[in-house]
Image: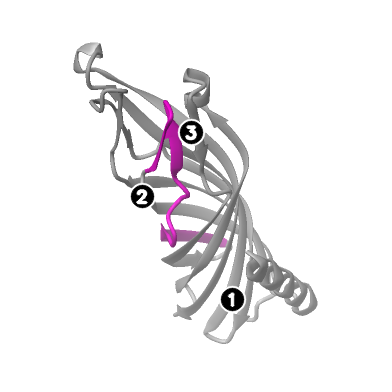
Amino acid sequence: MRLLVILFFLIIGSTAANAQIFGGRIGVATNQISSDSIYIQNNNGVDTFRLSMENGKNSTLVGVFFRMPMGAFYLEIEPMFATLNYPIRIQNLQDWNGGSLVKQERFTTFDVGLSAGFRLWKAVRFQGGIRSQIWTNYQSELNNYTNDYTNDWSRTIQSYHAGIGLDIVRVTLDFGFERTINGIGDNVSFLGNSTNFNANRNRFSVKVGVRLFSYEED
């Protein structure tokens, strides 16, 4: 995260000094979560509850981008706000007639992505890099459901990303893939049992942007 902040200010300073490219972006993303299932036992050592994570709802993305072209290559930094959901399904193995319920872990996050890329034909971009995400707001339906639940979601998450982009006059269109590097910080305690989901998250995103200021030479 510290490296991203330093590079963030370096690129902004270079962008302001050399009058390069600045724009706004919005988008949507789908989140795919892979995790273990957690089995909670009662005092007799019998599996009573099963907890599992499911794929989250679509995320909304809103932010800006700064791009510094260097011939066919470029650096880009992208600060964005995003929404994020971690649905957790709870199944009572001894009751509820085999039924289950889903409770949401909801986040608003601030993401800072740094990309390096190259362009072909001035309109097609290929890029990849790293992203750091910190959540700024968190609401838990599980906390409201039971006082015997606590979690240790990582406040800061690192991921790598890659994608392809198109520049059409002043409009940008980007398709990206992102995967967490060290999981999502998933240690939980439920009814006195401490364990974790061993979860990772993939994200597929589509973002549309507008170049608000552009002094790049054609």
- Give neighbour class at mark 3: few <14, some 14-19, many 20+ (Cα, 10 Å): some
Pointers 1 and 2 in contact (CB under 8 A)?
no
Task: Write down the residue under mark 2.
Answer: 198
Say above or below: 83 vs 97.
below
Q: Main secondary structure of the magenta part?
A: strand
Within the image, what quadrant is residue 111 found in?
A: bottom right
Q: Nearer the viewer, residue 190 or 36?
A: 190
Amino acid bearing label 2: Asn
Q: Quadrant of the N terminus?
A: bottom right
Decide which of tag 2 and tag 3 comes sooner along the chain. Answer: 3
Within the image, what quadrant is residue 96 found in?
A: top left
Residue 47 screen position, x and y as percent: 24, 27
Task: Write down the residue under mark 1.
Answer: 75
Label 2's element? Answer: loop
Decide which of tag 3 and tag 1 comes sooner along the chain. Answer: 1
Label 3's element? Answer: strand
Q: Nearer the viewer, residue 218 or 94?
A: 94
Tell me, yes or no, if residue 218 can be seen here.
no
